[in-house]
Image: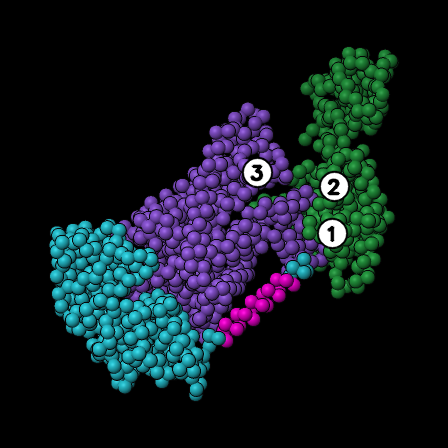
C-alpha cells in the first residue's frame, strides 16, 4: 500500500470541465470517503486515479511514483489499483475462484501461489465452499465481497471503491460496510470510497473529502467536516441541519431565533447560524429556552425528529430527541440550543 | 482500414470498369428508356416487398408474441425456416406448382415469402426484450391493450422493424434467382444480361453502380426511418410474465395466418422437392450428394469464419462509439450487400486471377463469401460485442490486463454465444450462394448450389431435387439454431445487468 | 472455454488443410509430360462429361473441368486475361468464342486439326472450331398458325401481332441478330427489331420458356434453336404440341450457329489440347453427339437429328460465323431499340 497525491487535476469531457484544479493527499493506510451529490465528479476522480480516463492537466502520484499526468504515464493495467466499480462488475463467465484469481499474472505467480492467494481471499471474505459458483448464483452482498476480494488479490497499491454498497438493502449494507472497512483497516489499505451516503462517509473513513462541481469543497476528518463545516451547504451534505437567519453584533454576540439574547430584528440579519437538530434540547418545563408549539413528530424508533414552530422564526425548528418520545402534537415545548454557534455571514 | 479496402474490391472494380465508358455513353445508358423501366420495376418491387414486410411482418411477429396461439414455439420455428431455402430453389418449386407464375406480382409474392423471416427474426427478438413491467405500467395508466401495443411496444421495436426492412430490402435489390426465373428484369437481372449477352462489362458496371446508388439511398432512408437512438430497457424472465391476449377470433386469425405462411413458404416447397425426388430417387448417387454437401459445408464455414475475422475490427470500432468513419464504413458495408453475386464474383476474378495458386482456390471462394456477407457479420458481431458492459473491461484493465488480454479473456468469452450466431447466419447464407460460387470455386469442385444450377439449367428438375432437398435440410440446422430462445444470451445479459 | 477455443482451432486448421489441398489441385505447372488439362465448359456436364471421360481414358490425361454458363465463362476468361488457368474453352455458342478470340486470348490451331469439320464452321482465323451445329428455327404450335412464315421479315407483319416470342438476352438470338446486321446492314436489323418489338413480340429470358409458352398456347410461335422441342418435352416428361419450322432456304432466319472450342494462347499444352479437339470432332464422337443432344454434326455425311432435314437442305445462309464475335454492336443495337 502506498500514499496518494493528486495535484491540480483537471478532467474535461469534451468542452465540459468535470474536475477542475483538484488536489488531495492521502497518507499510507488512510481510508478516505469521497462524498458529494450526483454529477460532482466523484466517480470521474476515481476513474482518473485508476487510469481509466485521461486528465487534461495535473499529476497523480502513488507514493513518489508519478503515475498520471495529462499524457497518461501508466495505463490502467500497470497501475495496480484495486478497483471495485459500482455493483461489483463480476465476470459473468467465470466462477468465484476464477474471478478472484483473474488479476493474478501467471508470469508473476506460480500456479500454487495463485491457488493459495485465491484460497486466502475466499477465506477473508468468508465465502469458503462457494469457489465454483458463478456470479449469477450469488446474492448481491456476496457479489460485492467477491469484487472486493478480486481487487485485494492483486495486492494493490490503492483500493478504489465506487459506491460498492449502493445496490444492497440497508441492513446488509451496514453489515457489509463494517466488515469491509474492518478488513481494509486490518490490511492497512490505502483506500478511497466513493459514496453519496453521508453516514457511510462519516462512519467508514479517516478523512472525508466533500466534492462540489468538480472541486474539493472541504477535506478533513469526519468530526471536522461534521462539526465545523465551512458553509451551510457543506453542513447539509454531512447531516441534517437547521439554517436560521442571524445577526452578529460588533461585540461578537450572535442573535438568532434560539439565542438567549433573542432573535435578530427583522431586516437586520447579516448571516446564518447552522444548527444540528441533535444540538437542541427540548423540554416541557417553562424555565428553559424559547417557547414553541410542537406541530409534527417523525418517529424513527431509536430517535425522533420534532418540528416546532416558534414565534421568533418563520421556519419551523427541527430537533432530534432520543426515543421513545413522550411528546404529543400541539403541546407547548421549550427549546434550548446547546451546541456551538456556527455563524456564517451573508455574502 | 485494410479491411475496408479488401471489402470494397467489388466497388473499385465497378468504378474502374464503368470509367471505361465515355461520359456521354454513360448518360445515354442511364437515361435510355430501358434503364428507367428496369429501375422503376426494381423500385416498385422493393417498395412492395418492404411495405408488406413492415406491416404484415410486424403484425405476424406481434401475433406470435402477444396472442394466445397453439404451439407458439413450433409456429415460430416454421416461420423462420424459409431462411434455409435459397430463392432460386424456392422459385423453382413454385413454378413447378404454378407453371404460369411470372411478372412483378409473382416476384413480389415469392420475395415476401422468402424475406419475411428476416423481419420476423429482427422484430421477435426485440419484442422478447421489451420489459413487461412497462406494459403493466401502461395498462395501469389506463391504456387499452391495443393502445399499449401502438404507444408502448411499437415505438420500442421501431428500430428492429427498420432493421428488418433494411435486410429484406437489400435482399430484394441483390436477388437474382427469383426475379430471373419469374421473368422480371430488375437491375440485378439487367446487370447479368449485359454481362452475359454482350460481354459488355462496362455497361454492366454502370448499371451496377446505379444499383449501388439505389442501395445507398435505401440505406440512408432507413436511418431516417429508424428514428432516434434510445436505449431500451431489456427484460428479465419476460416469457413467464408475458400475458398473451386471449381473444378467440384473434387467436384463430393469427393461427390461420401463421399456418398459411408456413404452408406457402415451407410445406409446399418441401412437398415439391420431396415429390420430385421420389419420382426418381436413384437418379443421383449418394456419394455425389455427400461430396457436394461436404464441399458446401466446408467452404461456407470458411467463408463465415473469414467474415467473422474481417468483421471484428469494424465491429470493435462500431462499439467504441460512433465516429464518422465507422458509420461510413457500416453504411458502405451494408450497401455492398446489395451488389449481386455476379459483380462480386467478377471483381474477385479480376483481382484473384493475379494471385497465382490462390485463384480458384477454396480460400478465394471463402473470401468472396466473406465480402458478400460481411454486412451480416458486422451487424451481429457489433451487436454481440456491445452487450459486454464497458465496466467489465475497465475492471479487467485495473486488474493488470492489457487491452488485448481484456479482449481475449473478458470480451470474447462473454460475447461468444452471440458471436457464434453471427457466424452461423453467414454460414447459412454462404451455403445458398450461387453466382460467385460458380465463378470462383476450384475447378472440378461441386457444391450443392452449383449442382442444383447445373441440373436446373438443362431442365432436369428431378435430379436437381435431391441436391436442393439436401441443401435445405442442412441449412435448416443453423436456421433452427437461430430460432432457439436465446437462453445463453439472455443468461449472459441477465448476469451482466444483475451485477 | 479453453476446450471451445481448441475446437475452433482444430476446425480452422482442418479447413486450412482442406483448402490447401484444393490449391494444390488447382495449380498445374507446365511440365514436359502433360498430366492435366483445364477446360472451361459452357456445355452442361450432363451432356459432355461422358465424352471427356472417354478422352481421359484414351489419352491418360486428367481433365479439370469447370462447368458454367458460356457467356459467364467467357467474361471470366476476359477478366482473367493472361492469368487464366484454362487451357481450353468449350462454348455453347460462337459469340462467346468470338469475344475471347477478339481479345486475342485464343491460339491458332494448325490445318491438320479438326480437318473433318466443314470450313464454314471454323473461325476464319482458325482460333476456334465448331463442334456441333444448332439451327435457328421457328418453333410453332401446329394448327395455331395458319400460314407459316417464309422469312424472318414476315414476323413483323400484322398476321403475327402478339403471337411471337423472342429471347433477346439469349446468346443464340444475339448471334442471329449479329448475323442479320452483318448480312443485311445495321439499318435493316434495326428496322426489323423495332418492327418485331412494336408487333407485340413477347420477351423471354430463355429459349425453353418460349417453347413452353407455345405449348401452353400463350404465344403461337417463337424464334429458338431446333433442339429445344426435345429438351422441353424431356423435362416435362410428355409430348408437347410444338414443332420446328424452317424459313425458306437461304433465309437469315435459318442461321446455323455452332458450339465450339478454342485453345487459350496462354496455355502451354497445345498438343494435348488439339488432341482433345480432334477427339471431339471425330466422326464417332460426332455421331454420338447427334444421338445424345439432338444437335447437328458439322461433318458432312453424319445423319441429322431425328426427323429434321439435313444441314445442307436447310440452306443455312452464308454467314461468317467468325464475324459473329461483334456482339458489342448487336448489344448496342438491342439496347437502342429497347429490347435489352
Q: Is residue B295 left or right of residue B133?
A: left
User: Of residues B364 and B325, which is closer to you in this image?
Assistant: B364
Name the mark nearer the viewer: 3 or 2: 3
- Mark 3 to mark 2: distance in Å? 24 Å
Screen quadrant of the N terminus of chain C: bottom right
* Element type at mark 3: loop
| Image point (52%, 62%), residue name | B297
* Element type at mark 1: loop
Residue C8 covered by magenta stretch: yes
| Image point (69%, 51%), residue name | A93
Tell me the residue that label 2 is attached to: A140
Percent x, y of residue B208? 35, 58
Tell me the residue that label 1 is attached to: A95
Instruction: Give me the disc on residue B130.
Output: 3
The chain drawn in green is A
Question: What is the chain identity of the residue bearing mark 1?
Answer: A
**Which of pointers 2 and 1 lies earlier in the amino acid sequence?**
1
What secondary structure is the magenta-colored segment mainly?
helix
Same chain? Circles 1 and 3: no
User: Of residues B470 and A306, which is closer to you in this image?
Assistant: B470
Label pair 3/2, CB-CB below 8 angstroms: no
Which shade is chain B? purple
Question: What is the chain identity of the residue bearing mark 2?
Answer: A
Same chain? Circles 3 and 2: no
Percent x, y of residue C204? 27, 55
Screen quadrant of the C terminus of chain C: bottom left
User: Of residues C169 and B128, which is closer to you in this image?
Assistant: C169
| Image point (40%, 83%), residue name | C59
Residue span colored magenta: C6-24
Amino acid at each position: 500500500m502506498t500514499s496518494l497525491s493528486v495535484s491540480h487535476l483537471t478532467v474535461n469531457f469534451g468542452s465540459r470541465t468535470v474536475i477542475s484544479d483538484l488536489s488531495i493527499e492521502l497518507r499510507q493506510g488512510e481510508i478516505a470517503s469521497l462524498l458529494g451529490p450526483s454529477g460532482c465528479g466523484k466517480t470521474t476522480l476515481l476513474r482518473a486515479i485508476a487510469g481509466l480516463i485521461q486528465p487534461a492537466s495535473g499529476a497523480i502520484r502513488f507514493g513518489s511514483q508519478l503515475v498520471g499526468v495529462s499524457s497518461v504515464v501508466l495505463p490502467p493495467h500497470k497501475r495496480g489499483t484495486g478497483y471495485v466499480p459500482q455493483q461489483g462488475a463480476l465476470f459473468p463467465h467465470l466462477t468465484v475462484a476464477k474471478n478472484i484469481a483473474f488479476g493474478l499474472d501467471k508470469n508473476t505467480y506460480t500456479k500454487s501461489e495463485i491457488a493459495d492467494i485465491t484460497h486466502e481471499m475466499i477465506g477473508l471474505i468468508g465465502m469458503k465452499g462457494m469457489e465454483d459458483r458463478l456470479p449469477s448464483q450469488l446474492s448481491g452482498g456476496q457479489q460485492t465481497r467477491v469484487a472486493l476480494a478480486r481487487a485485494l488479490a492483486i495486492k494493490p497499491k490503492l483500493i478504489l471503491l465506487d459506491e460498492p454498497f449502493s445496490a444492497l438493502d440497508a441492513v446488509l449494507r451496514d453489515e457489509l460496510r463494517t466488515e469491509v472497512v474492518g478488513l481494509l483497516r486490518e490490511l492497512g489499505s490505502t483506500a478511497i470510497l466513493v459514496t453519496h451516503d453521508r453516514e457511510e462517509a462519516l462512519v467508514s473513513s479517516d478523512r472525508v473529502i466533500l466534492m462540489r462541481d468538480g472541486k474539493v469543497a472541504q477535506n478533513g476528518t469526519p468530526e471536522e467536516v461534521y462539526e465545523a463545516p465551512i458553509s451551510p451547504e457543506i453542513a447539509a451534505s454531512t447531516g441534517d441541519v437547521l439554517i436560521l437567519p442571524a445577526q452578529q453584533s460588533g461585540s461578537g454576540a450572535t442573535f438568532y431565533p434560539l439565542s438567549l439574547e433573542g432573535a435578530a430584528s427583522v431586516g437586520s440579519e447579516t448571516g446564518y447560524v447552522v444548527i444540528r437538530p441533535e444540538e437542541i434540547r427540548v423540554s416541557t418545563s417553562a424555565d428553559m429556552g424559547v417557547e414553541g408549539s410542537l406541530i409534527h413528530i417523525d418517529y424513527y424508533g431509536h430517535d425522533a425528529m420534532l418540528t416546532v414552530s416558534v414565534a421568533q422564526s418563520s421556519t419551523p425548528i427541527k430537533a432530534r430527541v432520543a426515543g421513545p418520545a413522550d411528546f404529543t402534537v400541539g403541546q407547548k415545548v421549550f427549546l434550548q440550543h446547546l451546541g456551538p454557534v456556527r455563524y456564517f455571514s451573508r455574502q | 482500414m485494410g479491411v475496408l479496402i479488401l471489402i470494397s474490391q467489388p466497388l473499385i472494380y465497378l468504378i474502374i470498369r464503368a470509367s471505361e465508358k465515355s461520359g456521354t455513353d454513360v448518360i445515354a445508358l442511364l437515361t435510355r428508356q430501358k434503364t428507367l423501366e428496369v429501375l422503376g420495376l426494381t423500385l416498385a418491387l422493393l417498395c412492395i416487398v418492404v411495405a408488406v414486410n413492415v406491416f404484415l411482418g410486424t403484425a405476424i411477429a406481434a401475433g406470435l408474441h402477444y396472442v394466445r396461439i397453439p404451439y407458439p414455439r413450433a409456429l415460430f420455428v416454421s416461420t423462420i425456416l424459409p431462411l434455409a431455402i435459397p430463392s432460386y430453389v424456392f422459385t423453382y418449386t413454385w413454378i413447378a406448382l404454378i407453371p404460369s407464375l411470372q411478372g412483378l406480382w409473382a416476384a413480389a409474392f415469392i420475395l415476401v415469402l422468402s424475406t419475411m423471416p428476416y423481419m420476423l427474426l429482427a422484430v421477435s427478438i426485440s419484442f422478447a426484450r421489451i420489459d413487461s413491467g412497462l406494459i403493466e405500467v401502461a395498462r395501469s395508466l389506463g391504456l387499452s391493450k391495443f393502445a399499449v401495443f401502438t404507444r408502448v411496444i411499437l415505438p420500442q421495436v421501431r428500430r428492429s422493424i427498420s432493421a428488418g426492412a433494411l435486410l429484406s430490402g437489400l435482399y430484394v435489390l441483390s436477388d437474382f434467382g427469383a426475379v430471373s426465373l419469374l421473368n422480371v428484369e430488375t437491375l440485378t437481372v439487367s446487370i447479368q444480361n449485359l454481362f452475359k449477352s454482350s460481354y459488355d462489362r462496362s455497361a454492366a458496371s454502370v448499371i451496377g453502380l446505379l444499383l449501388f446508388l439505389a442501395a445507398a439511398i435505401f440505406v440512408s432512408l432507413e436511418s431516417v426511418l429508424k428514428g432516434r437512438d434510445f436505449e431500451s430497457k431489456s427484460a428479465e424472465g419476460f416469457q413467464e410474465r408475458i400475458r398473451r391476449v386471449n381473444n378467440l377470433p384473434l387467436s384463430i386469425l393469427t393461427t390461420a395466418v401463421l399456418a398459411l405462411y408456413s404452408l406457402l413458404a415451407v410445406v409446399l416447397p418441401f412437398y415439391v422437392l420431396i415429390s420430385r425426388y421420389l419420382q426418381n430417387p436413384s437418379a443421383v448417387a449418394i456419394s455425389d450428394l455427400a461430396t457436394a454437401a461436404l464441399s458446401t459445408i466446408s467452404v461456407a464455414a470458411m467463408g463465415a469464419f473469414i467474415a467473422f475475422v474481417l468483421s471484428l475490427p469494424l465491429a470493435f470500432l462500431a462499439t467504441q462509439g460512433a465516429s464518422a468513419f465507422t458509420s461510413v464504413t457500416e453504411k458502405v458495408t451494408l450497401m455492398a450487400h446489395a451488389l449481386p453475386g455476379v459483380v462480386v464474383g467478377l471483381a474477385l476474378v479480376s483481382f484473384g486471377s493475379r494471385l497465382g495458386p490462390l485463384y480458384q482456390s477454396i480460400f478465394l471462394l471463402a473470401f468472396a463469401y466473406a465480402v458478400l456477407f460481411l454486412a451480416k457479420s458486422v451487424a451481429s458481431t457489433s451487436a454481440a460485442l456491445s452487450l459486454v458492459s464497458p465496466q467489465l473491461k475497465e475492471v479487467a484493465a485495473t486488474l493488470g490486463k492489457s487491452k488485448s488480454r481484456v479482449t481475449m479473456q473478458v470480451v470474447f468469452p462473454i460475447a461468444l454465444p452471440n458471436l457464434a450466431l453471427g457466424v452461423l447466419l453467414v454460414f447459412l447464407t454462404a451455403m445458398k450462394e450461387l453466382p460467385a460460387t460458380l465463378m470462383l470455386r476450384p475447378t472440378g469442385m461441386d457444391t450443392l448450389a452449383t449442382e442444383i444450377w447445373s441440373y436446373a439449367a438443362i431442365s432436369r428438375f428431378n435430379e436437381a431435387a435431391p441436391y436442393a432437398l439436401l441443401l435445405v435440410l442442412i441449412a435448416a440446422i443453423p436456421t433452427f439454431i437461430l430460432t432457439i430462445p436465446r437462453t445463453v444470451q439472455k443468461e449472459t445479459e441477465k448476469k451482466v445487468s444483475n451485477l | 472455454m479453453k476446450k471451445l477455443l481448441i475446437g475452433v482451432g482444430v476446425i480452422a486448421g482442418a479447413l486450412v488443410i482442406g483448402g490447401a489441398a484444393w490449391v494444390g489441385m488447382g495449380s498445374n505447372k507446365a511440365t514436359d509430360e502433360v498430366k492435366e488439362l483445364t477446360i472451361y465448359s459452357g456445355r452442361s456436364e450432363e451432356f459432355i462429361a461422358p465424352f471427356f471421360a472417354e478422352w481421359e481414358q484414351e489419352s491418360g490425361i486428367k481433365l479439370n473441368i469447370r462447368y458454367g454458363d458460356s457467356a459467364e465463362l467467357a467474361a471470366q476468361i476476359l477478366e482473367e486475361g493472361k492469368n487464366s488457368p484454362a487451357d481450353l474453352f468449350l462454348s455453347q455458342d460462337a459469340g462467346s468464342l468470338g469475344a475471347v478470340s477478339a481479345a486475342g486470348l485464343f491460339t491458332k490451331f494448325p490445318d491438320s486439326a479438326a480437318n473433318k469439320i466443314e470450313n464454314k464452321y471454323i473461325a476464319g482465323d482458325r482460333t476456334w472450331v465448331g463442334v456441333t451445329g444448332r439451327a435457328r428455327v421457328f418453333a410453332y404450335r401446329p394448327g395455331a398458325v395458319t400460314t407459316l412464315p417464309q422469312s424472318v421479315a414476315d414476323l413483323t407483319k400484322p398476321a403475327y401481332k402478339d403471337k411471337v416470342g423472342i429471347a433477346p438476352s439469349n446468346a443464340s438470338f444475339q448471334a442471329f441478330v449479329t448475323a442479320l446486321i452483318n448480312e443485311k446492314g445495321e439499318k435493316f436489323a434495326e428496322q426489323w427489331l423495332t418492327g418485331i418489338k412494336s408487333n407485340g413480340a413477347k420477351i423471354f429470358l430463355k429459349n425453353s420458356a418460349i417453347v413452353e409458352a407455345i405449348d401452353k398456347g400463350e404465344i403461337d410461335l417463337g424464334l429458338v434453336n431446333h433442339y429445344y422441342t426435345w429438351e422441353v418435352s424431356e423435362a416435362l416428361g410428355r409430348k408437347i404440341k410444338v414443332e420446328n419450322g424452317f424459313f425458306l432456304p437461304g433465309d437469315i432466319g435459318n442461321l446455323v450457329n455452332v458450339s465450339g472450342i478454342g485453345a487459350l494462347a496462354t496455355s502451354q499444352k497445345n498438343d494435348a489440347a488439339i488432341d482433345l479437339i480432334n477427339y471431339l470432332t471425330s466422326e464417332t464422337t460426332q455421331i454420338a453427339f447427334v444421338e445424345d443432344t439432338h444437335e447437328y454434326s458439322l461433318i458432312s455425311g453424319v445423319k441429322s437429328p431425328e426427323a429434321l432435314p439435313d444441314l445442307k437442305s436447310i440452306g443455312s445462309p452464308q454467314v461468317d460465323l467468325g464475324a459473329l464475335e461483334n456482339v458489342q454492336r448487336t448489344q448496342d443495337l438491342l439496347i437502342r431499340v429497347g429490347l435489352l
